[in-house]
Amino acid sequence: MAQNSGTPSGQTTQAGTSSTERRIPETRTGGSPARLADETSQGKTTIAASVVQKIAGIAAREVSGVYAMGGGVSRAFGALRDRIPGGSGTSSTSGVQVEVGEKQAAVDLDIVVEYGASIVDLSRAVRRNVITAVERMTGLDVIEVNIVVNDIHLPSEDEEEASQPAPSRVE
């Protein structure tokens, strides 16, 4: 039989548990660039989505077996940007997309895996490292980390690039 547990709205619940105690997951939002991460009587802290994006990118690259981040086009533009003196340092966010809410974050990663690495094990390690880093540094709850493996890097590709001399720019 249902008992009235004295909830503020006068709702009737079973076994004396309030309906407000149930945890309802928040929806993912990507609206404004900065969201509330911590609010106290002394003020509030906001963390920009770009900060979460950088943390996730750095954490993903720390895992052995991740050769690069991003799809082919973004890697090509990143390589070009790195050659330009004073080019923007956005290489840490290449291949990383985030959605940041008030208390939660979701991360999408595009990675290139080194040949020979177990993709399943590597994905687990990357996911664990990203979740740990983002949660520890921001206090946000990471609800998901989606990983797309775009390519496999072969060691022979490095040898081919190193053996071809750079064309001379002057005669």
Image: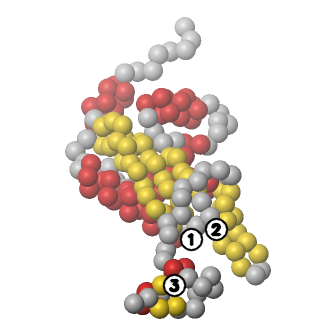
Q: Secondary structure at mark 2?
A: strand
Tell me the mark number nearer the camera, choosing from 2 and 3.
3
Q: Which residue is mark 3?
A: 12
Residue 126 percent coordinates (x, y):
37, 56
Mark 2 or mark 3: which comes first in sequence? 3
Q: Which residue is mark 2?
A: 37
- Measure the C-alpha gap from mark 1 to mark 2: 7 Å
Tell me the mark number nearer the camera, choosing from 1 and 3.
3
Mark 2 closeness class: few <14, some 14–19, many ≥20 residues within 10 Å: some
Quarter placement of the N terminus? bottom left
Residue drawn at (50%, 46%), measured in percent from left and top? Answer: 96
Mark 1 or mark 3: which comes first in sequence? 3
Asked if the residues shown at circle 1 and circle 3 are in contact, with their CB atoms under 8 angstroms apart, the answer is: no
Asked if the residues shown at circle 1 and circle 2 are in contact, with their CB atoms under 8 angstroms apart, the answer is: yes
- Measure the C-alpha gap from mark 1 to mark 3: 35 Å
- Indicate left or right for 38 with 42 as reference: left
